Amino acid sequence: MRLLTTPTLLLLLSTWPASPAAAQSQSGLSLTIYNDPSTTGYTYHGCYNETTDLPNTTGLRALHGGKVEIEPGEMTVQRCLQHCSSGAGDAQGGNTAKFQFAGLEYARECWCATALSGLSVKLADEECDLPCEGNKSQACGGNLKLTVYTLNSATRTAWSTAGFVVVGAAMSLALM
Ligand SMILES: *[C@@H]1O[C@H](CO)[C@@H](O)[C@H](O)[C@H]1NC(C)=O
Ligand SMILES: *[C@@H]1O[C@H](CO)[C@@H](O)[C@H](O)[C@H]1NC(C)=O
Ligand SMILES: *[C@@H]1O[C@H](CO)[C@@H](O)[C@H](O)[C@H]1NC(C)=O
């Protein structure tokens, strides 16, 4: 893991594409990356590669050990974030605790997990090029690629009883 200093991060951000949220699907449809942290508590994290075919993972998914919902014809980003908003089950939050990560894959799959595999590689946003089956204007991952969301820090601290933890998303960018 490599930490970027704030100046480096600002430089990165200033060279970021003007509208990273606009992706183009293979079918030519314009895809939007849904991102509404204040409403859902989850922030768009990026497009990540699935890990099932990598050596030494014994088939483990990039988001594993949580829960999965598959909803052909109905999946949307909001539905997935809703699914992942409960069931994480820890001593503090019981079964109402939210999963740290939510990922959409293959247009219809929703994966919830407490961690994102360090073996999963971050891809360009455009690599997640499949429209959600429940809303064709939203990006819902790709073939073995995940549109990943992470709980934002305000939501995390809201249910954390362990005290305030600075996650540092605003100050540095962690590259795996
Ligand atoms: C479909 O997704 C787009 C982009 O996120 C959003 O603007 C629109 O309101 C959604 N449509 C419905 C019916 O929810
Ligand atoms: C994504 O994962 C697949 C197999 O899981 C692998 O073949 C491919 O090289 C990976 N791509 C990147 C950019 O890591
Ligand atoms: C997989 O595990 C084997 C045996 O431990 C090791 O030799 C090999 O380098 C590993 N491959 C990767 C890609 O980590």
Image (cartoon, helix red, strand yellow):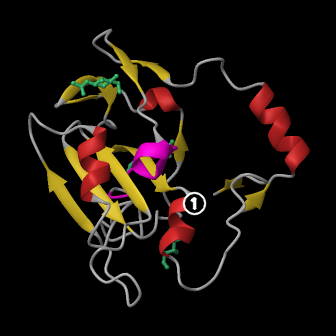
Of all residues shown, which one is farthest toward the left? Answer: 72
Instruction: Reply yes or no: does residue 142 show up in magenta.
Output: no
Quadrant (top left/top right/bottom left/bottom right) for the C terminus = bottom right
From this view, report whether residue 5 is shown above or below residue 143: below
Where does residue 99 sit, x and y in percent of width and height? 38, 66
Residue visible at 51% across and 25% down?
21
From this view, report whether residue 70 is shown above or below residue 107: below
Locate residue 139: give its quadrant.
top left
Q: How crowded is mark 1: few (under 14 residues within 10 Å), some or many (20 or more)?
A: some
**Relative side of 176 to 132, left or right:** right
Residue visible at 38% across and 91% down?
91
**Relative side of 119 to 90, left or right:** right
Q: Which residue is nearer to you in this view: 59 or 42?
A: 42
Where does residue 52 sit, x and y in percent of width and height? 32, 58
Q: Which residue is nearer to you in this view: 89 or 5?
A: 89
Residue visible at 41% across and 70% down?
114
Where does residue 4 sit, x and y in percent of width and height? 81, 52
Q: Which residue is nearer to you in this view: 123 or 86?
A: 86
Quadrant (top left/top right/bottom left/bottom right) for the N terminus = bottom right
Where does residue 45 sit, x and y in percent of width and height? 52, 46
**Residue segment shown in magenta:** 37-52
Please say whether residue 47 is visible from this viewpoint.
Answer: no
From this view, report whether residue 20 is shown above or below residue 2: above
Amino acid at circle 1: Ala
The residue labelled by disc 1 is 154
Instruction: Reply yes or no: does residue 44 show up in magenta.
Output: yes
Locate residue 143: give its quadrant.
top left
Residue visible at 23% across and 66% down?
67
